[in-house]
Amino acid sequence: MPTNKPYRKSSELALDVGRRPELDSDAAEMVSIVRKGLKSNIYGWLRQALAVSDGKLSTVIRVSQRTVKRRLRDGRFRPDESERLIRVAKLAERAREVFGNVESAREWLKSPQFALGGEIPLEYADTEPGAQVVEDLLGRLEHGIIA
């Protein structure tokens, strides 16, 4: 996909490393997918998309590396884990929309931000309220409001 084209669906999850069809869904389908659990290959795709280590991504989604390995072997994440993976993927998508390119989105998500008290957005988003704060910050940046 061209980097100058805005992403329109959560299936186009921001970082140009390929689409995950199971995330190309409307809300009702997404509920069903989460209840069943995301396929485990989404983890490797998201890790690559964000250019982070296994340790970093497992910390952000609050799943131990040992459990991640088990999920990768078993083929699916549990519903609660799937929700957290989707949260991170959507946040990455939003950052890409705001910054207009993959590299800037990655850099911002992994760099300390003054508006977050010097915390790193990706790490701050390890909870739903934290992810909402990061998304709100992205919205302010998009509209030129000093954060």
Image (cartoon, grey):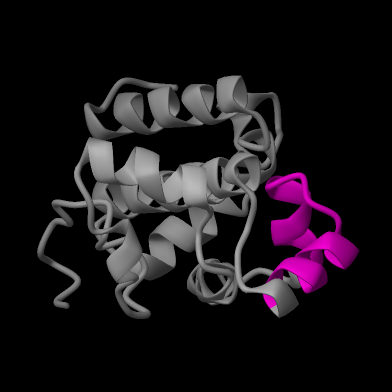
Please give left or right for residue 103 compared with residue 1 in the image.
right
- Look at 71% across and 32% down and name the residue there: 118
**Foreground residue among 5 and 36:** 36
Q: Quadrant of residue 3?
A: bottom left
**Foreground residue among 14 and 45:** 45
Query: Split into 4 quadrants, where in the image is the C terminus?
Result: top left
Residue 5 is situated, as x and y percent measured from the top left of the image, at: 10, 64
Residue 8 is situated, as x and y percent measured from the top left of the image, at: 13, 51
Residues drawn in magenta? 55-72
**Foreground residue among 46 and 67:** 67
Query: Is 7 one of the magenta-colored residues?
Result: no
Residue 53 is situated, as x and y percent measured from the top left of the image, at: 73, 71
- Look at 60% across and 65% down and name the residue there: 76
Residue 126 is situated, as x and y percent measured from the top left of the image, at: 68, 37
Q: Main secondary structure of the magenta part?
A: helix
Residue 14 visible: no
Residue most toward the left?
A: 5
Q: Is residue 144 above or below residue 95?
A: above
Query: Is 64 one of the magenta-colored residues?
Result: yes
- Look at 27% across and 45% down and name the residue there: 29
**Foreground residue among 102 and 12:** 12
Residue 9 visible: yes
Query: Split into 4 quadrants, where in the image is the N terminus?
Result: bottom left
